[in-house]
Image (cartoon, rainbow, N blue to C red):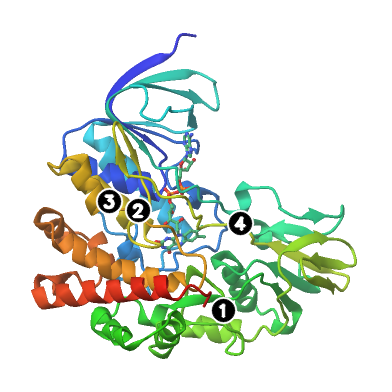
Amino acid sequence: MPPTTITVDYLIIGAGATGMAFADVLVTESNHTMAIVDRNQAPGGHWTMSYPFVRLHGPSRVYGVHSRAMPSDSVGANLASGHEILDYYDRVMRETLLASGRVTYLPMHNVDDVEPGGPATVRAHSLVSGASTQIAVRKRVVDASYMNITVPAMRRLNYDVEDGVPIVPVNQLVNLGGPAERFTVIGAGKTGLDACLWLLHHGVDPDRITWITSRDAWMNNRDQEAPLSRFRELTKLHACNSVDDVINALEQMDLIIRRDPRVRPSAFRCATVSSAELAQLRKIEHVVRLGRVRRIDSAGVRLDEGSIQSPPGTVYIDCSADGLTQKPPKPVFADNTITLQTLVPCLLAPSAAIAGKLECLDLDDDSRNRLAPPVVNPSTSRDLLSFFGTRMERLHRWSGSPALFEWLLGSRLGSALSDLQEMTDQGNRAAVSLLASHLEDLLKRDGVSA
Ligand SMILES: Cc1cc2nc3c(=O)[nH]c(=O)nc-3n(C[C@H](O)[C@H](O)[C@H](O)COP(=O)(O)OP(=O)(O)OC[C@H]3O[C@@H](n4cnc5c(N)ncnc54)[C@H](O)[C@@H]3O)c2cc1C
């Protein structure tokens, strides 16, 4: 069958949080046409494959798209559930994007290779019928898949498991069909935290949980999320003289927390917990810190730095996928491509909306790239300094661009930068810039790992 051909201004690869946030700004702030192509059968990206009890771990008012509030924005801690998120993206697709008459949506389609600098015509094929669509792109190809988020349901285990050992991906935890003698949770990221909290919430005695964590991590304290005076509070960091000093000060300010006060974490992966959740997690005493899992058999678990025995009746819960990859940064705007990346650490949806706004502003690509240098997502505890420093630096950078700044001030996603309003004051602008430079200097000077 000959391929169908469509012609659009933009091709957006991926209908996850970033593709949707970008498309929404383009639809609401320009007259351009676009095709959105995604392998999944519904918009929402990795949320379409998440475990049933997943929720946002940051507030919904800084998630989603610019033009539409999330139902949870004004409810309690604003932690939308996976179902709400999928319903939200379905509505954004139907009621905003498709209703504009300027969007063609191709779910269950794969975009085949796009050459860098690339062709004006890109081929997508249906993962169901195999039919091809040629997409002629007048302006740009937008890669909203570059960050390559992985959740446990998407990948094979990266350790060996003997046949017959009961191990389930976190998505299956709700389908066990009966209690287990013991639960061993593998992974200490956001998903591992959620699995432990879910087990405790359902009355599992903490003594029946083993938690395998390759690295302890600092976590954001949700009780302190986005206090309006955050930058004022953070100016205290000027007094710090080393990376360790800064981390200690952040902990004293209660902005970051750790699960075990006796263990200094070496990681920071943007996970966020409340103090109530932390109190629950601290009830789990059987925490295994022997590196990564290599093999699980009927006797127990072999890890990088030792082994543990498991009693009969242990069920293993795999929560070990990397939901926050460290992709090498590249220019967001280049020739006829846009590569959506993180502009504000850990906040991919606002980052994509900002890239969308920059595309709509009358700027050349050099100016756009100067306003939108991408950052690498955090991994180690040292990255806490970039996490806070980059936010300060972005406040300064963006408040110097009147058109972008005005838009951010009126945008629901702009509230991700909690001190935006304060940046109308020149003194405050100078203060955030100084603080960002101080943190960067400390990182350069203090090469040892914190
Ligand atoms: C469990 C979990 C909880 C999280 N909670 C929060 C939170 O509370 N707050 C927050 O800000 N962030 C949170 N995050 C971070 C989150 O990953 C991002 O906010 C965001 O959802 C990432 O979206 P994305 O569009 O970059 O990626 P994805 O969701 O991975 O979407 C990419 C899409 O591209 C499609 N695609 C890829 N290649 C192709 C191709 N060749 N052809 C067609 N389609 C293609 C894929 O099918 C996919 O749908 C969380 C992440 C996880 C894993």
Hey, what amino acid is under mark 2? Pro
Q: Residue at x 36, y 44 (%)?
A: 19
Q: Name the disc covering residue 374, or none.
A: 2
- Labels 2, 3: front one: 2
Closer to the N terminus: mark 3 or mark 1? 1
N-terminal label among 4 and 2: 4
Q: Which mark is residue 265?
A: 1
Q: Is mark 4 within 8 Å of ligand 1?
A: yes
Alpha carbons under labels 1 and 4: distance apart: 19 Å
Direction from residue 170 to residue 304 in the image, left or right: right
Q: Residues within 10 Å of mark 1 (few under 14, many from 20)?
A: some
Q: Position of residue 144 (x, y in %)?
A: 39, 42
Examine the rendered structure and indicate whether residue 333 appears above or below residue 421: above
* Residue at numbered disc 3: 353
Q: Which mark is residue 120?
A: none
Label 4 amino acid? Ala
Q: Residues within 10 Å of mark 3 (few under 14, many from 20)?
A: many
Separation (CA) of disc 4 from disc 3:
26 Å
**Which residue occupies 49% across, 30% down?**
110
Question: Can residue 188 be seen in the rendering of this structure?
Answer: yes
At which x and y percent is residue 397? 20, 61
Distance from Cα at disc 3 to Cα at disc 1:
33 Å
Query: Circle 3 — which element?
Result: helix
How dense is the environment of label 4, judged by Cα within 10 Å: few (below 14), some, or many (20 and up)?
many
Q: Residue 75: in sight, yes or no? A: no
Task: Pick whichever of labels 1 and 4 is earlier in the sequence.
Answer: 1
Q: Residue at x 52, y 62 (%)?
A: 54
Quarter of the image holding residue 76?
bottom left
Q: Label 3 amino acid?
A: Ala
Q: CA distance from mark 4 to mark 2?
A: 23 Å
Mark 3 and mark 1 in contact? Answer it, CB < 8 Å.
no
